[in-house]
Image (cartoon, rainbow, N blue to C red):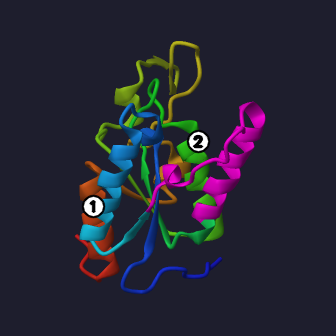
Amino acid sequence: MTHATHASPANPSVYLAGFDVFRPDAIEHGQHLKRLCGRYGFEGLYPLDNAAPAGLAGRALARWIFEANIQLLRRADFVMANLNPFRGAEPDSGTVFEVGFAVARGTPVWVYTDVAAPLTAQIPCVRQGSRLADAQGYTVEDFGLNLNLMIACSVEVVIGDAEACLRRMAADRDGQAG
């Protein structure tokens, strides 16, 4: 599936997915990410660029945030997602949803994480016959991947930070992958 390009070819847009929106300095961090995007020739689209209407609360506010983020995702030429562990061993579930949404639309996705170790080294597990299991007895994927196979096999994974990811995105865009 293809998607419409909304930014100029010189400045393709990048939706900046990640749990960064929960940081105490989320607005400032978003501005930092957007400046990094500009440095590499992209227009950053940060979820907190949207200001919710006054008076919304609870489920109505949640619905408004969801719709605003979906609009930004639909507008984006690319998605860059922070998939570092969040509140446990796995990435933020909202960010994973955004990655899946973009992949389903055919939008190219790059993710970054500082975790290079395979899942079997990240999650305490024991051998149970021919499989590895976590403390609850659930199988731990043993494919040598640092992320769940549904993510690792559908996106470009960069080990490093946001700038390393943008550098890789720019190199791929310019035909100089490496």
Residue 25, percent across and down?
A: 35, 36
Q: Under tag 2, what secondary structure?
A: helix
Residue plotted at (34% across, 45% down): 28
Instruction: Rate crowding at label 2 as few (under 14), some (14 to 19) or many (20 or more) other CA atoms within 10 Å.
Output: few
Q: Does residue 158 show up?
A: no
Q: Which residues are magenta?
A: 45-73
Q: In the depicted view, which residue is nearer to us: 122 or 88?
A: 88
Is residue 101 in the magenta section? no
Residue plotted at (71% across, 33% down): 57
Inspect the image, locate mark 1, and give the three-letter code of the amino acid beneath it.
Answer: Leu
What residue sits right under mark 2 in the picture? 94
Residue 143, percent across and down?
A: 44, 43
- Spatial CA distance of label 1 from label 2 is 23 Å
Residue plotted at (58% across, 62% down): 72
Residue 117, percent across and down?
A: 30, 37
Name the main secondary structure of what is drawn in magenta.
Answer: helix
Q: Is residue 101 above or below residue 19?
A: below
Q: Is residue 152 above or below residue 34?
A: above
Q: Under tag 1, what secondary structure?
A: helix
Looking at the image, which residue sits at the far bottom? 9
Mark drawn on residue 36: 1
Looking at the image, which residue sits at the far right? 60
Is residue 50 in the magenta section? yes
Instruction: Answer with the quarter of the image where residue 165 lies.
Output: bottom left
Q: In the depicted view, which residue is nearer to us: 123 or 80?
A: 80
